[in-house]
Structures are given as structure tokens and as C-alpha cells.
Image (cartoon, rainbow, N blue to C red):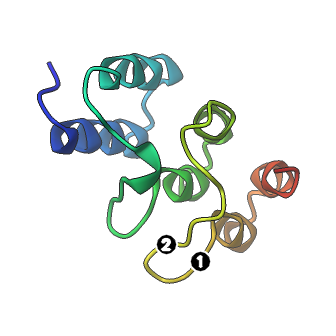
Amino acid sequence: MILDRHQFARRLFHTILHDGDLLDIELLLRKSSRINVNLDRLRHDGQSLVHVCCLRNRLDLLKLFVEGGLCGVLSANADGWLPIHIAVYLGHTHIVLYLLGK
């Protein structure tokens, strides 16, 4: 059971960072509707959800967050990098192409 925004954020980032299943993330997002959470403002070590998706090469989750209107692609991380910078740097071409289309 998710009690607050902090617990939700920890669980969400933990699931993503440990290669959680898309269905697990969708379930967490449904549960988040009971609490007031702005997903675009969540951070883990200075990285937004979109940045973490780029770091972990998770195009499926990136699409879920962006196309669902939950997160934008133009926010900078703590180092000033946009998600596309991370995707280019790491060579995640499919993510770069997706982000260029946004």
C-alpha cells in the first residue's frame, strides 16, 4: 500500500532501476491517482523519470510517461542535461529518434 508521495517515488524509481515490468509500473501509476503526485517533478539522484528511462534504455517506459502526458522531455537534470543528451551519449539510438519526434 502506498501512503504518500515519497513512498510512491521510492517504489517507482526502485522498480525502474531494477528493470521492473511495464505492468508493474502501470499498476503503480494507477495507485498514484489516489495521491497528488506530479511525476514530472520526481527526482532520483538528480534525474527525472524521463532521464532514468534514457539511462536504463527503457523506451517502453519513456513512451508510457511521455505519451500519457505524465512527463515532458525538456527538463534538465542536476547536471543540466536533457534526456536526449543522455540518450545520445549512451548510444540509445531508438530513444534518440523517439525524442527527436517529440
What whole-number distance in Å separates the C-alpha atoms at marks 1 and 2?
5 Å
Left or right: residue 9 compared with residue 49: left
Cβ–Cβ under 8 Å for marks 1 and 2: yes
Q: Nearer the viewer, residue 71 or 64?
A: 71
**SS at mark 2?**
loop
**Residue 62's image quarter?**
top right
Q: Which residue is tagged 1? A: 81
Q: Nearer the viewer, residue 95 or 41?
A: 41
Q: Callout 2: few (<14), some (14-19), or many (20+) C-alpha neighbours within 10 Å? A: some
Q: Which residue is tagged 2? A: 77
Q: Residue at x 23, y 44 (%)?
A: 10
Three-letter code for the amino acid on which mark 2 is drawn: Asn
**SS at mark 1?**
loop
Quadrant containing the N terminus in the rendered view: top left
Disc sitting over residue 95 in the figure: none
Q: Residue at x 85, y 57 (%)?
A: 100
Q: Nearer the viewer, residue 67 or 35?
A: 35
Asked if 28 appears above or below 91 in the picture, the reply is above
Q: Residue at x 32, y 26 (%)?
A: 32
Query: Residue 39: where, in percent of width, then height?
Result: 42, 44
Q: Callout 1: few (<14), some (14-19), or many (20+) C-alpha neighbours within 10 Å? A: some
Query: Residue 52: where, in percent of width, then height?
Result: 49, 55
Asked if 2 appears above or below 69 in the picture, the reply is above
Left or right: residue 96 compared with residue 75: right
**Residue 75's image quarter?**
bottom right
Number of marks present in the image shown: 2
Q: Nearer the viewer, residue 4 or 7?
A: 4
Query: Residue 96: where, in percent of width, then height?
Result: 80, 58
Three-letter code for the amino acid on which mark 1 is drawn: Trp
**Residue 78's image quarter?**
bottom left
Instruction: Single out the residue that lies furthest toward the front.
Output: 36
Q: Residue at x 62, y 36 (%)?
A: 69
